[in-house]
Image (spheres, rainbow, N blue to C red):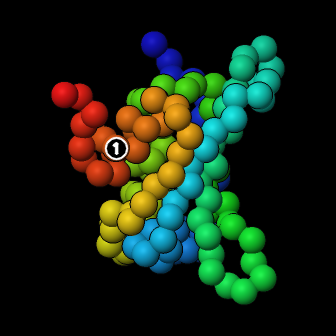
Amino acid sequence: MMEPPTLIFYSMKSINVLHKVSKDDIIYIDATGNVLLGQQHGYVYEMVVQYHVEGNPPLAVVSMITCSHDISSIANFLRRVWHAQSKQGLSRPYPRLVMCDGSMALTKAIVTTLFKESLEA
């Protein structure tokens, strides 16, 4: 079975910001499902940090557009982002806090990928 098309957007500078901020602050991850990609329903995921520079709003550091909203595709997205840090020679810190909405797919992907934990009893 073919994987759904997925585009992930980031820059090396945004990965550096994510690395710096994730050790001490909150990472926000959210998705919207109100995007149509041709005949398929699409999702836009945003990873946002509060970049504490006076007068600057929160900063979107990584974005993903995909046709899939499941644990596997979200976990793959997160692994790619954290792998981008290691490609730059940055250590892979665990984020201090990750906030998301009530999406079970998003929550499970974050817990298993970033924190190596399980939500299973």
Asked if one can make out residue 54 in the rendered structure from this viewpoint, the answer is yes
Q: Is residue 106 left or right of residue 89?
A: right
Q: Residue 80 versus residue 97: which sits nearer the camera?
A: 97
The spot of residue 52 in percent (x, y) is 62, 81
Asked if one can make out residue 88 in the rendered structure from this viewpoint, the answer is no
Residue 64 figure quarter: top right
Residue 49 figure quarter: bottom right
Picture layout, residue 51 above or below residue 5: below
The spot of residue 112 in percent (x, y) is 31, 41
Query: Residue visible at 25% across and 47% down?
Result: 116
Q: Which residue is mark 1?
A: 111
Query: Residue visible at 52% across and 60% down?
Result: 27
Q: Residue 20 versus residue 121: which sits nearer the camera?
A: 121
Q: Residue 11 versus residue 110: which sits nearer the camera?
A: 110
What secondary structure is marked by label 1?
helix
Which quarter of the rendering shows the N terminus? top left
The spot of residue 115 in percent (x, y) is 29, 51
The residue carrying pointer 1 sits among few (fewer than 14), some (14 to 19) or many (20 or more) residues within 10 Å by Cα, namely: some
Q: Is residue 115 left or right of residue 30?
A: left
Query: Residue visible at 77% across and 29% down?
Result: 35
